[in-house]
Image (tube, rainbow, N blue to C red):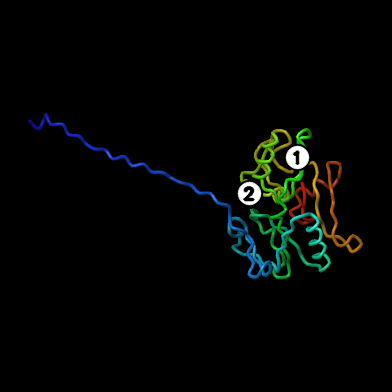
Amino acid sequence: MPLSHKVFIRSTLVFLFFSFVLSTPPEDPIKCSSQNTSCTITNSYGMFPDRSTCEAAQVLYPTTEEELVSMVASAARKKSKMKVATRYSHSIPKLVCPEGQNGLLISTKYLNKILKIDVEARTMRVESGVTMKELINEAAKAGLALPYAPYWWGLTIGGLMGTGAHGSSLWGRGSSVHDYVVELRIVRPAGPEDGYAKVESLNEQHEDLNAVKVSLGVLGVISQV
């Protein structure tokens, strides 16, 4: 057969490339050398802007508001400096750093319960360690939704409240999550006459509610929202 009449069949190799993305939560920002003592804390990025790592003498993990009150009272009685840490410590500034080995961390990692959902009032009561993902999922089950939220689901309700975290909109009340909070509870240090710790419950009629909403952790530990 003449070459011009020959039929050449060319094989085409098709390579298919599949890309798999595995998403995992950040590591625990708190690490201790002995049980819950001699600890260090960083943030979810693994470093603070000045590349330092904060130290703390001890970290405490309350599981109820009653335990939180007891821990705050004990630290206040001893005049220990306290700072609040969230599950992933997402804040970039060093707001969480106590006074080195003389300081104390109180983590809200296990204050993570959904306490009440009122469908008719369209409200939820949660502990401050509940994450955005947990809040949104539980709200959806009840046919509710949060109008606006920050970009990352790992933020805790207490953490985003204390730092004024927000979404992006000027519609309605705005995109800040704290603008939709109607009541919260905060545990703060007190004098001996109050047992060295006191629980304050603030609603929309309380003149200090707006100050406590975005308090950067300096007024106490938010226990419920």
Q: Is any atom of residue 147 visible in this view?
A: no
Amino acid type at mark 2: Gly
Q: Is any atom of residue 183 visible in this view?
A: yes
Q: Residue at x 76, y 65 (%)?
A: 81
The residue carrying mark 1 is 117
Q: Quadrant of the N terminus?
A: top left
Mark 1, residues whose alpha carbon is within 10 Å: few (<14), some, or many (≥20)?
Answer: some
The residue carrying mark 2 is 154
Q: Residue furthest toward the left?
A: 1
Q: Position of residue 95 (x, y in %)?
A: 69, 58
Q: Residue at x 63, y 49 (%)?
A: 154
> Is 112 placed left or right of 44 in the picture?
right
Q: Residue at x 41, y 44 (%)?
A: 18
Q: Which quadrant would residue 166 be assigned to in this image?
A: top right
Q: Position of residue 155 (x, y in %)?
A: 65, 49
- Up-down relation of residue 68 to residue 182 (above or below): below
